[in-house]
């Protein structure tokens, strides 16, 4: 098809996006898809030939490149090669997959666990195989896109409650028919705002209204709790989440997603979720890396202490300079800018000074809530964080965001 000669909705969509990207490039506001050529110690990277402080990483405990994890991946390649014999259900399952699932179940204190090849796909396939027409799903308004897509794909009645608003959630639960299956789902730590879901209250509500609870721990594993095991540990609650979802691509330096829970639930997913049945198994190196990473988190708790100290320093420092960091309590630190233009300009000035941060603009966040989303990790040096904050401060001052 010649995109230039046909005029329909699809070609218009492509043209509109191209125009937006071209505009950004024209103003030097295009920051996406920049290649890192080298990963350096202390959360630094080489980009465009320059060494920059990485303040946009999800590697919260700085585990990318950890010797034990690299070694485990290499051993798996030697033992199994780089691929598998297909999908898990048929010929694709390797011992390392079973080991990984056992490790996750131990880490999350559940009976068992199942893994998929991405976190995104985990949410799609799990929500849509548990819920269907006539059922009700209740989702926080700023939940991750993969949750939204999974809810839509399920065909269930889709109810969105105001962000972390438990009264609103209760109202919606009350209005749903008593005899339908209900699923309440939320991020543990919200990926754009860095704040934490009110777990005690949401547990109470799901019990009261006989609903399942699914929590996405993409940003809480390795981050929340003294041992880094996640949101239940953070609130001092036991095993209160029915469906514990997480990714293997953030603190865990691999790729993939998992669900930890009761044996009955996981057995159902092993035979009833399409991404498990119709998509190839995790590559051995990635499974082995993930398996080792969960153990490293437990063996090296000082990383969590360092992450917490760095987070306090970063949030406290930026607030003290006059920035609005919303309600974050974690390593994801939004710096509210308002307009897209301000977020782009702040990012540009920071990157020019070798602080690698990225803007988040609409439609990823609500209009008027555009921001820089910065992150810190356990790998950052406090003196580097101090310097990065000074760069952000000078840039913010130059464009009238702070005094
Ligand atoms: C990143 C993320 C995912 C998707 O995980 P991938 O492993 O990158 O596919 C799902 N949920 C949340 C909240 C995330 O932040």
Image: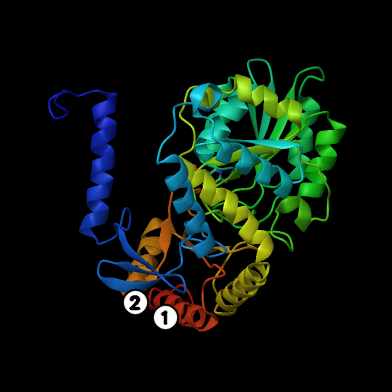
N-term-proximal mark, 2 vs 1: 2
Task: Give above or below for 81 relative to 23.
Answer: above
Single out the residue that lies furthest toward the front.
Answer: 79
What x and y, as percent, mark residue 383? 51, 84
Q: Quadrant of residue 52?
A: bottom left
Q: Do tag 2 and tag 1 residues touch (Cβ < 8 Å)?
A: yes
Disc 1: CA contacts within 10 A as few (<14), some (14-19) or many (>=20): some
Q: Quadrant of residue 251?
A: bottom right
In the image, 319: left or right of 353? right
Q: Nearer the viewer, residue 308 or 206?
A: 308
**Residue appearing at x 76%, y 32% in the figure:** 262
Q: Nearer the viewer, residue 264 or 401?
A: 264
Disc 2: CA contacts within 10 A as few (<14), some (14-19) or many (>=20): some
Which disc, if any, is residue 394?
Answer: 1
Q: Quadrant of residue 352?
A: bottom left
Residue 156 visible in this rendered orientation of the protein: no
């Amino acid at each position: 098809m010649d995109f230039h000669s046909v005029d329909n909705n699809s070609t218009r969509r492509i043209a509109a996006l191209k125009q937006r990207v071209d505009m950004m490039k024209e103003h030097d506001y295009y920051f996406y898809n920049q290649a890192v050529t080298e990963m350096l110690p202390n959360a630094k990277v080489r980009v465009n030939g320059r060494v920059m402080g990485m303040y946009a990483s999800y590697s919260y405990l700085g585990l990318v490149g950890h010797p034990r994890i690299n070694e485990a991946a290499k051993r798996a390649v030697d033992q199994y090669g780089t691929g598998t014999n297909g999908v898990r259900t048929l010929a694709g399952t390797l011992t390392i997959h079973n080991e990984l699932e056992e490790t996750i179940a131990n880490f999350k204190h559940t009976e068992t666990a199942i893994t998929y090849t991405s976190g995104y796909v985990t949410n799609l396939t799990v929500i849509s195989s548990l819920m269907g027409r006539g059922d009700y799903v209740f989702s926080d308004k700023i939940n991750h896109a993969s949750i939204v897509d999974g809810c839509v794909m399920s065909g269930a009645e889709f109810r969105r409650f105001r962000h972390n608003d438990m009264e609103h959630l209760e109202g919606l639960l009350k209005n749903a028919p008593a005899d339908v299956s209900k699923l309440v789902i939320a991020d543990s730590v919200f990926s754009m705002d860095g704040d934490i879901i009110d777990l005690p209250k949401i547990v109470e509500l799901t019990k009261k209204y006989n609903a399942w609870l699914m929590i996405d721990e993409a940003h809480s594993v390795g981050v929340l709790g003294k041992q880094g095991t996640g949101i239940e540990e953070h609130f001092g609650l036991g095993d209160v989440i029915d469906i514990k979802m997480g990714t293997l691509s953030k603190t865990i330096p691999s790729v993939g997603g998992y669900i930890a829970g009761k044996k009955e639930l996981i057995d159902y997913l092993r035979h009833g979720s399409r991404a498990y049945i119709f998509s190839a198994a995790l590559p051995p190196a990635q499974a082995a890396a993930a398996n080792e990473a969960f153990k490293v988190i437990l063996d090296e708790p000082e990383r969590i202490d360092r992450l917490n100290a760095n987070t306090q320093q970063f949030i406290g420092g930026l607030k003290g300079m006059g920035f609005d960091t919303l309600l974050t309590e974690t390593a994801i630190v939004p710096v509210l800018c308002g307009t897209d233009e301000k977020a782009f300009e702040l990012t540009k000035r920071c990157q020019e000074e070798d602080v690698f941060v990225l803007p988040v603009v609409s439609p990823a966040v609500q209009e008027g809530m555009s921001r820089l989303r910065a992150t810190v990790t356990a790998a950052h040096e406090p003196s580097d964080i101090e310097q990065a904050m000074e760069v952000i401060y000078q840039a913010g001052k130059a464009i009238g965001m702070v005094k």
